[in-house]
């Protein structure tokens, strides 16, 4: 019986830390509310340490994606359940924050849009669906599988299809022994250990994946020149809050009054041009010409967005 049990576990892929019982939480259903919350917080505190341990792999994934996007490719996320929903969340939030849409980063969720709002049973077990949802990719693309267990068939199908088509591949998983890590270019394997509730990977595993995705996409956007210092320069001002944020960013970057910043932004039409005009003290037309000379460039060290170079040029210097 012991041998049969071992075979059964292998078939179902349950050899993952997230599927093991957590000895620290075995009595959680006997705890009063305050102690229950404290226990979960203690477990969550370990996630940062686990994520920090894979910092080098996250950096390698960032460089892989920056190179791909610089060559005209796209980043694809592929995932199911919580992992897939986190990929969708990361991708869709790039538009209002950095004005980057599905032409640059696109998420494929097992079960499609319907699965974002409700569980769609069985779809994660279909590798053909993963390949079909991924569609056509090329050598300039990067396909990032997101799977807590590191074995989800849907994700495996997408990664296998990506490799067959010549794309680069990566995996973000919370299982150091993730089977899908074999063959990918970059494997980010976070050891978050057993969950508070056995197998509930929306907990620590989900938190770790969200942290990695946040760092990954944000670092990629910084490297692509979507920021000036720690300020957003590509915010799509689609509502009053985002329009106010853009003006506030100009105030923070230039120390000029809000009315002046709002007027220059209105004349410039975009934050980067307005920044150069305000910092260099030149008119919008001159700023626009200089911004055109110094577009975002990932190879321009210390100034990927080009704002500093344009300002230096306006002041009679030369900055690369």
Image (spheres, rainbow, N blue to C red):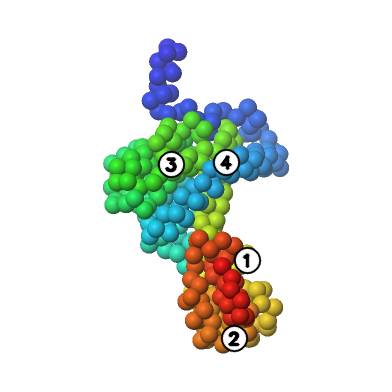
Distance Cα–Cα, label 2 vs label 4: 45 Å
Distance Cα–Cα, label 2 vs label 3: 46 Å
| Mark 4 surroundings: few (<14), some (14-19) or many (≥20) residues within 10 A | some
> Which residue was labeled with disc 4?
54
Q: Quadrant of residue 113?
A: bottom left
Seen in the image, is 53 located left or right of residue 151? right
In this view, 214 is above or below 293: above
Residue 283 is situated, as x and y percent measured from the top left of the image, at 56, 87
| Mark 2 surroundings: few (<14), some (14-19) or many (≥20) residues within 10 A | some
Reading the chain from its start, which is encountered first: label 1 or label 4? 4
Q: Nearer the viewer, residue 210 or 306?
A: 306
Residue 274, can we see it? yes
> Which residue was labeled with disc 2?
282
Residue 189 — which label? none
Distance Cα–Cα, label 1 vs label 2: 21 Å
Element marked by disc 3: loop
Q: Nearer the viewer, residue 67 or 206?
A: 67
Reading the chain from its start, which is encountered first: label 1 or label 2? 1
> Which residue was labeled with disc 3?
185
Element marked by disc 1: loop
Residue 161, can we see it? no
Reading the chain from its start, which is encountered first: label 2 or label 4? 4
Element marked by disc 2: loop
Q: Nearer the viewer, residue 10 or 319?
A: 319
Q: Nearer the viewer, mark 4 or mark 3?
A: 3
- Asked if the residues shown at circle 2 and circle 3 are in contact, with their CB atoms under 8 angstroms apart, the answer is no
Residue drawn at point x = 29 percent, y = 42 percent: 164
> Which residue was labeled with disc 1?
229
């Amino acid at each position: 019986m012991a041998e049969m049990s071992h075979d059964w576990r292998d078939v179902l892929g349950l050899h993952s830390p997230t599927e093991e019982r957590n000895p620290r939480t075995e009595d959680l259903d006997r705890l009063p509310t305050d102690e229950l919350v404290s226990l979960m917080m203690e477990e969550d505190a370990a996630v940062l340490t686990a994520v920090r341990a894979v910092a080098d792999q996250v950096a390698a994934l960032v460089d892989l994606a920056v190179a791909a996007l610089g060559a005209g490719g796209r980043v694809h996320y592929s995932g199911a359940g919580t992992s897939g929903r986190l990929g969708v969340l990361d991708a869709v939030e790039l538009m209002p924050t950095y004005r980057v849409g599905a032409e640059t980063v696109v998420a494929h969720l097992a079960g499609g849009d319907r699965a974002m709002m409700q569980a769609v049973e069985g779809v994660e077990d279909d590798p053909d669906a993963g390949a079909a949802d991924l569609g056509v990719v090329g050598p300039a693309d990067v396909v990032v599988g997101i799977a807590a267990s590191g074995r989800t068939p849907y994700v495996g199908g997408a990664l296998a299809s990506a490799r067959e088509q010549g794309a680069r591949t990566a995996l973000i998983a919370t299982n150091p022994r993730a089977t899908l890590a074999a063959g990918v270019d970059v494997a980010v394997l976070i050891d978050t250990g057993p969950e508070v509730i056995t197998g509930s990977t929306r907990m620590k595993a989900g938190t770790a994946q969200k942290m990695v995705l946040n760092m990954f996409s944000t670092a990629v956007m910084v490297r692509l020149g979507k920021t000036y210092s720690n300020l957003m320069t590509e915010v799509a001002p689609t509502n009053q809050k985002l329009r106010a944020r853009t003006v506030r960013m100009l105030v923070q970057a230039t120390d000029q009054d809000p009315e002046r910043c709002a007027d220059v932004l209105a004349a410039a039409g975009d934050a980067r041009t307005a920044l150069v005009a305000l910092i260099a003290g030149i008119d919008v037309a001159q700023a626009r010409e200089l911004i055109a000379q110094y577009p975002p460039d990932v190879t321009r060290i210390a100034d990927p967005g080009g704002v500093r170079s344009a300002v230096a040029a306006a002041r009679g210097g030369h900055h690369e």
